[in-house]
Amino acid sequence: MPQYNPPLRDIRFVIHELLEANKTLAALPNYQDIDKETINQIIEEAGKFASEVAFPLNQIGDKEGCTRNEDGSVITPKGFKEAYQQYVDGGWPSLSCDPQYGGQGLPQLLNTVLYETLNSANQSWTMYPGLSHGAYECLHAHGTDEQKKVYLERLISGHWTGTMCLTEPQCGTDLGILKTKGDPLADGTYSITGTKIFISSGEHDLAENIVHLVLARLPDAPKGTKGISLFAVPKYLINSDGTLGARNQVTCGSLEHKMGIHGNATCVMNFDGAIGTLVGEPHKGLNAMFVMMNAARLGVGMQSLGLTEVAYQNSAAYAKERLQMRSLTGAKEPEKAADPIIVHPDVRRMLLTQRAYAEGARAFAYWVALMIDTELNHPNEDVRKDTADMVTLLTPIVKAFLTDNAFAATNEGMQVFGGHGYIAEWGMEQYVRDARINMIYEGTNTIQSLDLLGRKVLGDMGAKLRKFGKLVEAFIDKQGVRKEMQEFIDPLADIATKVEKLTKEIGMKAMMNHEEVGAAAVPYLRTVGHLVYAYLFARMAKIALNNKASGDSFYEAKLATARFYFEKLLPETAMLIRQARAGSKSLMAMPADLF
Ligand SMILES: Cc1cc2nc3c(=O)[nH]c(=O)nc-3n(C[C@H](O)[C@H](O)[C@H](O)COP(=O)(O)OP(=O)(O)OC[C@H]3O[C@@H](n4cnc5c(N)ncnc54)[C@H](O)[C@@H]3O)c2cc1C
């Protein structure tokens, strides 16, 4: 049976020592009163809920999966419903939501911590409240007063859940070719008709109502993405007094059988003249949906951080217990039949890879979450704009870099267990299967890479990237004079220079041939991901060095992980840069009919 202990020490380190979150929050009018103690208490309680309530259901959910009844209703695995009720009773859905609608008004940062721990515990279960939170954010930003009145309180309380309905059989990445129709009705509502596939949490028994946010086309819609509108379509219609009315014409046609996340219902949803209301302006639905898509992209990053952490914890514990072979430098535990496998260099490589990916991801994701708090709440418009630019730049990196790393990390976790990792009982193979989807949904990692390089970097001639570069430069200028920081500053400065040169080179090539962007995007995103991690690990190493004399082994471990990161993981960029520079020629040379 796998174990999960919320990594409270590292969570507190990132929030209080690395980010000094209280200083940032003190400048934001809504959060000035939140002290460290409150933050620590919430983190601890979140960890308790995750490890004691959600975690014990993870393997059950994987084995049982969801069941669809003939009438289209869906039953979630044993215990999911009770756990969700406990989540609602505990007020967790409302943590970072707007107090005007019953939310607790706490920072996004704390919600991010909550989601890390929940995802370590049980990604499938966490997707039910996770998507609801995205629906809340979308309606909060773009809903009419009436929609806010009807939906927000219920989503915030958790009594209703939400979904995002984009994908159709013929359209996944290319939303411009979606066919679902929204026909206006005399009373100002719309009749929605079409089929959506792969809809996470599309139907279930956890909550009394579900609000589907559906992309569809109005009759006069222009072709392509400029003709897409967004609609809120409830499972049960809502009477004028707010009570639930008749069943709407939206049903789950079938459940997908899939590789992982078995506890989450992935549904084909049939809309047969379902009644919906327009969210935002006609034909500007994609704009409104982007609020949910961006939240979901960061959410998928948190899924991957969660899985990386739990896989690491279990493989580290196993490596200390499992006895196989002797250390290359002579027996370490001669009284035993063999040494524990943690003595072997390559087992340590696998463990440290997972650990570095977990700690790097935590630092990165929490940093972005705190920037979102600043973007939404800072009194100064310029500060809001600058942080918004950074969040825009970094979002595809959170999505793609963390999810690729989590697949690698959970795989390493399974490998540490040897054959036992492949056997279901230990839980490690489930982590690999669950981690795999994160690289696909919410826009595949290729699409994230194209978004980063094409739109966010080259699209503004590198302006946003330069903002990030300035932070790195300032850190290098300040810390470069410290001898003990040299081992971190030199490689950081090196990768920063290389990213700058690579960006210019691809930009020049792209002017001649657009396929150069497509050919370079994936290795480019990974290279920039490493630049972000190098910057954050150098900052973490600085804190660890400053606290070396304290004798606290936490800092010793942090320094060891940072050193491993710089020596063993960052060098991947040498290969990535070569791949990015190699361009499109060899990719495009082969005629399609020869594949
Ligand atoms: C378990 C699960 C849950 C999901 N949950 C939801 C949900 O809740 N709501 C929802 O709306 N959708 C959901 N999805 C759908 C998911 O978001 C899509 O599967 C994903 O966006 C990719 O679309 P597609 O499968 O149609 O692949 P396609 O778009 O057909 O892409 C196939 C391949 O081509 C590549 N490709 C496409 N265009 C380009 C390009 N321009 N350049 C380079 N490569 C390209 C892709 O990267 C991919 O590798 C879910 C899917 C799964 C499997």
Image (cartoon, helix red, strand yellow):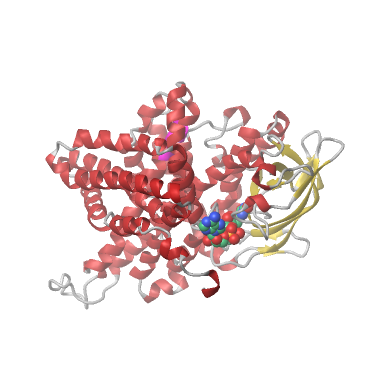
Residue stretch rendered in magenta on the structure: 368-374
Left or right of 138 in this view: 42: left
Tell me which residue sits at (68%, 60%) in the image.
169
Tell me which residue sits at (75%, 39%) in the image.
277
Residue at the extreme right of the image, as rendered: 186
For residue 197, above or below residue 481? below
Left or right of 446 in this view: 196: right
**Rendering quarter of residue 571:** bottom left
Q: Where in the image, quadrant-wise, is ligand 1 located? A: bottom right
In the image, residue 413 lies at what x, y percent? Answer: 37, 65
What secondary structure prevails in the magenta region? Answer: helix
In the image, residue 40 lies at what x, y percent? Answer: 39, 37
Left or right of 149 in this view: 347: left
Name the image quarter holding the N terminus. bottom left
Q: Is residue 168 magenta?
A: no
Tell me which residue sits at (62%, 34%) in the image.
140
Tell me which residue sits at (70%, 29%) in the image.
145
Residue at the extreme front of the image, as rendered: 512
In the image, residue 496 lies at what x, y percent? Answer: 28, 44
Q: In front: 509, or 147?
A: 509
